[in-house]
Image (spheres, rainbow, N blue to C red):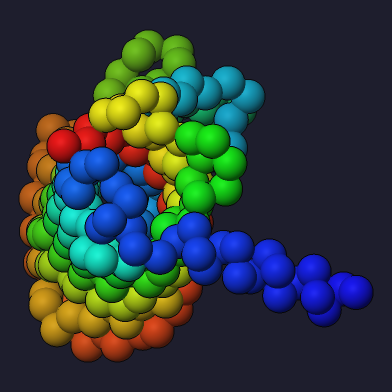
Amino acid sequence: MRKTLFLLVLFTSTVKSQNLEENSKFKNTISLEFYQPFQNNIREFYNDDWILGYEPSEKSNYSRNAFSNAFGISYERVLKNFILRTRFGVSVRKIEESNGYEYISEEQNFTSILSKEYSYKQIHINSLIGVIKRVNLVNNFDFDFGIDFAFVHYQKAEGKLQYNINEKTISDNRLLKDQIINVNDRIGSIQSIGFGPILKPLYNFSDRLVVSAEFQVYFMNTFTKDQTFRLETSDTIFEDGSSENIEISQEINYNVNQWNWTKISPLIRIGYLF
């Protein structure tokens, strides 16, 4: 009985999903997409964690202003009994953090005020192509399943850190040390290419308006042979009026080739049929 019921459901789904071109009133759909940027699990090229860590003090001030989202368009074309889909999107990531605290040592007669500021920005270019089979569930509800092939280009990024330490005596507010450290990172680009399943419920609000959702996940090869450059400068003024300037440059040559699953990227899509 269970086997017969399973075959009946399978047959019904197949009948409903075939001859899409003949049954569809409109052959094209163009949509706007909003989703979480694809995370490649390589910290240097994608990190949404808090960058500036906790400082050992009784009181500190921390602020964070971050934005991480992806926007895109997709186009679907009904071709007989399947659907061909192309997608193009841009991910925007910006992070600004600041942290500051004051350390007081009455025994050693000094106070130390420390402040940190960090900023980071990066753009990703997302290109995808997919093949879809559509099944009508009930009334205006459909379900798409298929496969997506994805390519993500993580463009060069910039990271800037400013670190300031100001030390003075408590008794007469005399300067002991004032140091400013600037670290500038120019992070090289990296690419990811791979594939993942399409599992997409959709609902037709009207003849021309449709909304759908996806939980995107991809098995991707992430690779690069690009370089990252770091320039660190330190300017210090001491108690006796003397000063010191130090400049350190660093070059990191990457040779990365990694296969892994991305984290789940939720997506919502609003489409127009024509």
- Residue 232 % position (x, y): 15, 56
What residue is shown at x 40% (from left), y 65% (from top)?
Answer: 18
- Is 59 situated left or right of 53 in this image? right
* 46 versus 204 height, above or below: below
* 150 versus 268 height, above or below: below
- Front-most of 250 and 38? 38
Can residue 142 be seen by looking at this rendering? yes
* 6 versus 58 height, above or below: below
- Residue 67 % position (x, y): 31, 33
Residue 228 sits in which quadrant?
Answer: bottom left
- Front-most of 135 and 265? 135
Residue 166 sits in which quadrant?
Answer: top left
- Is 66 situated left or right of 140 in this image? left
- Residue 115 % position (x, y): 34, 29
What residue is shown at x 80% (from left), y 69% (from top)?
Answer: 5
Q: Residue furthest right?
A: 1
Quarter containing the N terminus = bottom right
Number of numbered callouts drawn: 0
